[in-house]
Image: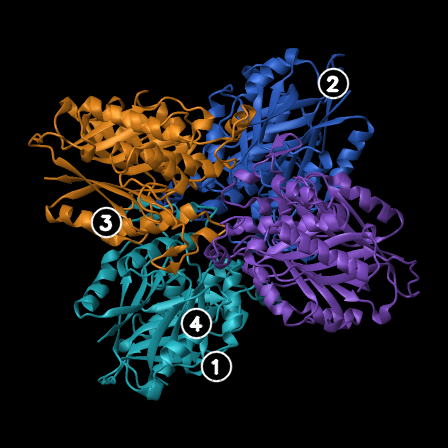
Chain colours: A orange, B cyan, C blue, D purple
Amino acid sequence: MAFPIRLFKYSTNGPEDTTPLDRLRTEEGFEADDVLAVVGKSEGNGCVNDFSRTLSSVVWHSRIPPTSIAVFSGGTEGALNPHVTFVVKEQGGESTGVVALVGRTRKFEPEEVGSSVQVREVEKTIKGMMAEANLPPSLVHLALCKCPLLTTSKISSILAKGLEPITTDTYSSMGSSRYAAALGIAVALEEMSGSDEAIAEGLRSGGESWSARASCSSGAELDDCHILLLAGEPHEVKPLPERKRLGISSGYMKDAIDAQALLAILDPIAAQGGRVVQVFVKAEASPSGLVRNKRHTMSTDSDVHSTRHARAAVGGLVAGLTGDTAVYVSGGAEGQGPPGGGSLTVVYEVA
Amino acid sequence: MAFPIRLFKYSTNGPEDTTPLDRLRTEEGFEADDVLAVVGKSEGNGCVNDFSRTLSSVVWHSRIPPTSIAVFSGGTEGALNPHVTFVVKEQGGESTGVVALVGRTRKFEPEEVGSSVQVREVEKTIKGMMAEANLPPSLVHLALCKCPLLTTSKISSILAKGLEPITTDTYSSMGSSRYAAALGIAVALEEMSGSDEAIAEGLRSGGESWSARASCSSGAELDDCHILLLAGEPHEVKPLPERKRLGISSGYMKDAIDAQALLAILDPIAAQGGRVVQVFVKAEASPSGLVRNKRHTMSTDSDVHSTRHARAAVGGLVAGLTGDTAVYVSGGAEGQGPPGGGSLTVVYEVA
Amino acid sequence: MAFPIRLFKYSTNGPEDTTPLDRLRTEEGFEADDVLAVVGKSEGNGCVNDFSRTLSSVVWHSRIPPTSIAVFSGGTEGALNPHVTFVVKEQGGESTGVVALVGRTRKFEPEEVGSSVQVREVEKTIKGMMAEANLPPSLVHLALCKCPLLTTSKISSILAKGLEPITTDTYSSMGSSRYAAALGIAVALEEMSGSDEAIAEGLRSGGESWSARASCSSGAELDDCHILLLAGEPHEVKPLPERKRLGISSGYMKDAIDAQALLAILDPIAAQGGRVVQVFVKAEASPSGLVRNKRHTMSTDSDVHSTRHARAAVGGLVAGLTGDTAVYVSGGAEGQGPPGGGSLTVVYEVA
Amino acid sequence: MAFPIRLFKYSTNGPEDTTPLDRLRTEEGFEADDVLAVVGKSEGNGCVNDFSRTLSSVVWHSRIPPTSIAVFSGGTEGALNPHVTFVVKEQGGESTGVVALVGRTRKFEPEEVGSSVQVREVEKTIKGMMAEANLPPSLVHLALCKCPLLTTSKISSILAKGLEPITTDTYSSMGSSRYAAALGIAVALEEMSGSDEAIAEGLRSGGESWSARASCSSGAELDDCHILLLAGEPHEVKPLPERKRLGISSGYMKDAIDAQALLAILDPIAAQGGRVVQVFVKAEASPSGLVRNKRHTMSTDSDVHSTRHARAAVGGLVAGLTGDTAVYVSGGAEGQGPPGGGSLTVVYEVA
């Protein structure tokens, strides 16, 4: 089902801080029950041993409705601010300009993670969500997906079945799962062909097929994929006079320093007097080892993981161009934008 | 003495890579003997145990004239590209639009590092350099200073004299030395009062007095301060017809995401069809723990040092706005720009 | 009150894993209500942003009685195994050979953290616990203390009162609080004089006064000090025939590689056919920069914090000598053993 | 050729410190020309971007004879002391009890690194060295090998030839090269079969075939393998009366906390009044994720590389048992001892 929504964001004092719910109530008049999704940045390393992400998941899942989803992405490197974004159902279901849909795939067997089965299930779930809401793919500007990873015990269970795991490296399984989810999104949103050949080729190529609207993150705390779609409203919007209208745009950064991609979205918003509510962007170290033909050192730094470098750099750029450090910059962009770049979505408000 | 100069920059393949000298010769026709200064970014952590900086110093000092200086700043986090910038004397001493002056203070006793003695010596040296060249302070847009730090053995020698070291922490001495040098620059360039009271107050306040044109870095490999001044040419410039004219501008970032400060310099350059040759900028984690009133986590991250975070974020912004990752982003901005911000200088070329 | 106790330890699958309570029940027949204390090692960095510690605290405090205490120490570097040790009341209050006492100080004002007030309150609380149980200081072999630290907001509140905080650095406040608690323990256990002069001198010297039986760790989640004492039973022990007798010994490592200190405790246990149940040891990088007159690099490594190095090294040694990686090796040993060394307590079981 | 040798070791003040050569001359009467090999621990991270290793190589190769070798292993985590060990030719070629042989393979094509070609060349070279010196494999207690790795440009050149590189990950190529070298050593020292099948199976199994006497490290600064063999003297030794006799023993640690393996070598040395001169040991995180059936967290720590953890832990144990922190603990033990353990050699001196 597609709900007209509002978006509110609040800084947090730590991964365990749920006081933003109080501000949502007192400042905006919404209750925890109105929350469709909490999408947050927590301040861990964003990698395998990021316990800030687990801590946020634990405290938030006990506060929001069981059908709602909590997606936490670890890592607020550089100037980034730990925060949460609430996606809440508009009161009375009045039009706002942007709708949200929340869904889940079935649970995956460990050996399915990162495989074409995951691609197809994500595709099927998103297509089902859009069909039920009568929403064309072209209106969807963000498909945010939280997906499972392979823990050591899941890898053992695959081996015990006599099957071959996609990888025996826990960290590397995070990328495989993100990539399979991204391909499923790309097919569902008609950004790539859904033929078996195309998917097989996509999985083989490891990053050359991609969606400009996918934002995926992996975690150990779930076995299915949790999906949030943000889309423009299919019908003409007549917001209540006292409320502002929301808009949503998307694009993609072609590399980690692609200011133009951001400005191409931000400038028209500014031109109509709008205010940016939230930027959702993916970041990664260019697999070629180069940014605009010059060497970067993100992938040869054995002290700091490349995803941390990439979030810090892209975060600095996005925060600089928006004047806001509470932006959703997420690392690990396999299939979510072109190699070395990342998907990009902006939600904004106009008078 | 003030030499009209050219600026050339080249990416490096590693801290020990001096092949850019070959390119300087074959591509631009300059020899190692023409080099007044090598200013480089090497790919270590930029902190106490950054051996990339030492390695670069070792290999470069054996290649350039003994009176020339090599300033290496460690840390190419995020998208940044390890590179060197050559400041070379223009052939025939012809005007170019920008002049360089190179100088050194006397060597410091360990107990003088970070003290008012260091402030006064840096001030005196810069004033002497400007006076000899008949250059007014207002024309100087960058004072780059490499200064000593306190090693464990220097701290021991201070204690052996019965004196009190400014700090017993090696890392912290890097900041004290940078700050004292920055105050000396601020006084010499008439950015702050040179009274004893003002200097004492500056040293006490720890960062509230500052220069918008200072860029200082500390290293264990020297006992004096090495200084490079870049300034606009005092006389009208008539460059040779086949060469382009250089220009230089400066300002400061008021915080780590101050895109406007950069654009205020870059936009006029673009308007006159100019090309940015190099950006020199300092970066630091805001000591208040906030960027534009929102919490950052650079100073509470016990895995990655705050200077690494700051370089990555500011580097992402500067590279995004210039389209170039080979920019000189240096961490540790005590007294070099306002707290949480940093000094900013741009050298550019116009037809 | 002094309870005869049993000690059981279990590996954990992650900081949020409370399944050891199930094993305690099914394997040993004890309930969560029997737990006096949970003392655990969780797998974060053990520094300021260790969210594994917070996560463990959150999940465990909801499982044990409100008067019981949970002390988690972050950091299982090297071969160390994340685990929890349960201190449980023996069934029927029968003698076991070792008793435990649990207590708390009053809550501290922020400005009291790290001061002589904290020293005196810890001293007073421990003396009160021992007096109530009629237990002489000489029988106490371990005083485990969890103590508050200064968060950014606590520092602000001190400044708002016009007072001087002991430090404005959050990380450094962890050490100050540990040290004050350690001095309080040293006085209560009669390891140092309790005169005002001795305490003032101890606070001034920063580490030269110490207790061989103190083990302190700081955390942001409490405002008072939580204290666990482990002591030999004051009366002769007649354990039930089907249960084994417990013993407890203590000493101190004089430096990070002091195998002899460990062997001096382990050898007599082995000689009587005993089995080591748990080793509690503190570790730190020698402040002199030397171990047995040779330079170490723990304090000049800007990539990995010195406490992480120290835990890994001491953990390797203790695990090697005991054949067990689930040992309690805790970092930050200010006043808990001599500088560069650490307090050391072993609980063992004999037939 | 096999030279009777002496072993001397000295702490260094930093990676660029070659002053130990002065001490070698003044304290022991040996010149740089007598040095067959310098085997050192430098204080970087021991991983891809360890510039301390490069810096040490640069400064040392300019000081020792061109036919001599310098093997630097990065990483002095925990209590370990940065130092160098000199292997010098005994004056007059008098017997000492231990001989050294130095050799090099031919240079490898990039595509040969990590392949059976590298295995065979290492095998052939060592067999040739032993044959020329008439030395049976059983007398060799340490085969120290420095081998090449795949840089980004080498990987590109392999791809340009239309060949498949063993890995496209620079870091991972370090392990592949170490492993191939270790297999070559295992075959040459008759620790495993040299059949094509055995080598193919060894390369396939990734670590299950191993040598108890191999110690390999990779570096970007060479294209061939540099090999140092230390062996017991084949003939009866009659040392000069004023010199002490050297001895050499080897074994292997079966896991990272295998104190018994060390004691089995150290106890007999102590029993005959000997003095340990140097311990050479390899360390790695157990690939199973377990040490003695308990989980370790070295491989899931995204902040600190597992080789750093392993060196710190094993270093703590070895330093504790020998009372000396200047021991050669090297990380990355693929094929150098059993999985999770490491090869172990001790050189000692007896009156």
Give the mark toward the camera: 1 or 3: 3
Residue B7, x across and y down, in percent: 34, 75
The amino acid type found where label 4 is placed reads Pro
Query: Mark 3, residues whose alpha carbon is within 10 Å: few (<14), some, or many (≥20)?
Result: many
Give the mark toward the camera: 1 or 4: 4
The amino acid type found where label 3 is placed reads Leu
Residue B20, label in figure:
4
Q: Name the residue tied to disc 3.
A: A262
Query: Mark 4, residues whose alpha carbon is within 10 Å: few (<14), some, or many (≥20)?
Result: many
Query: Marks 1 and 3, how far apart in space?
Result: 45 Å
The amino acid type found where label 2 is placed reads Lys
Give the mark toward the camera: 2 or 4: 4
Is residue D29 shown above or below D133? below
Residue C244, label in figure:
2
The answer as to whether the residues below labels 2 and 3 share one chain is no
Query: Marks 2 and 1, how far apart in space?
Result: 78 Å
Residue for point 39% across, 22% down: A107
| Callout 2 touching callout 1 (CB < 8 Å) | no
Q: Quadrant of the N terminus of chain D?
A: bottom right
Residue B65, label in figure:
1
Residue A170, x across and y down, in percent: 49, 35
Query: Marks 2 and 4, how far apart in space?
Result: 74 Å
Most distant residue in the bottom direction = B92
Query: Mark 1, residues whose alpha carbon is within 10 Å: few (<14), some, or many (≥20)?
Result: some
Query: Marks 2 and 3, how far apart in space?
Result: 70 Å
In the picture, residue D227 is in which quadrant? bottom right
